[in-house]
Image (tube, rainbow, N blue to C red):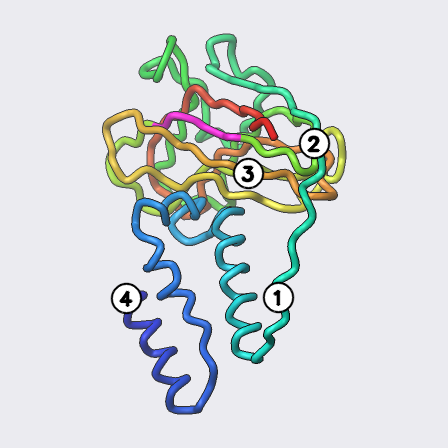
Amino acid sequence: MMDDYAEAIREIGRERGLTVFDMHALLKAVGREELAGLFGDMAHPNQDGHRVIAEALCEFLVTTAGIDTPKPVPPPPPQVPVGEAHAWDFEAGLQDWTLDSPEISLDADRAASGRQALRFHMQEPAKDHRRALSPALPAIPGQRYDISAKVFPEGQPAGSYGLYVMLYATPDGNGRYIEPLPVKGQVPVPGAWSPWAGRVQIPEGAVSFRVMLWAERGTVATFRVDDITVTPVAP
């Protein structure tokens, strides 16, 4: 379907004499395996994906405009203090996680390690999205983190769910978030523990962040999540 949509856009460009930035061709050329590392879920690029698209778009605009000025050399990245690592296996309970729906609970029937995991059990669509949020962690702008978890889907889901990092302008992680960073979307293989993993970089303006497990309001699915980790990446 996306191939047909992209070709329709190209055809409109040819018919009307319009310049087209072909992002579809760009992403297809990346290759399936590398492309998976550029998306937080099935539809939304992560930070690395946005960077690849932005760099290609800038090159396209400069070339199209006939600008031959050499590309400026970016300044070296500033030194950033290394943040703290965090991990949750839920063996000691919720460990200050917040569950905003009765459809999310601690469950002792199946865990990736130990005895307990978080379970999302959604039998029908809801009025709002379902969320499980970690305690607020201090954000260091410029710091990169590897975020990982293990997920066990039961059967094929209807709808979507995923792993995110939510950024806040307050130290306690309360109030309206300022930006969500997608880490990874749902795992297509049911009946087994599979890894969720991705890397995020904390932008300027963020004071704290939370790890969020999210299922959209229309999702009908059951899955478990365990062994969530936040690991700072050394400069």
Kind of element beneath mark 4: loop
Residue occupying image coordinates x 52% and y 35%: 131
User: Is the stretch drawn in magenta largely helix, strand or loop?
Assistant: strand
Question: Residue 184, how many percent across, how many down?
Answer: 43, 39
Q: Position of residue 179 (x, y in %)?
A: 63, 46
Q: Relative to residue 161, is residue 82 drawn left or right?
A: right
In the rendered view, tell whether residue 11 sits above or below residue 153: below
Q: Are marks 3 and 4 in contact (CB under 8 Å)?
A: no
Q: Nearer the viewer, residue 11 or 44?
A: 11
Q: Check disc 3 and report the residue beneath it.
A: 200
Residue 80 — which label? 2
Q: Which residues are magenta?
A: 146-151
Who comes first in sequence, dot 2 or dot 4?
4
Magenta stretch encompasses residue 150: yes
Q: Is residue 50 magenta?
A: no
Provide the residue designation for mark 4. 1
Query: Three-letter amino acid code at disc 3?
Result: Val
Residue density around tag 1, few if under 14, some if 14–19, many if 20 or more, within 10 Å: few
Which numbered disc, 1 or 2, marks the residue closer to the eye?
A: 1
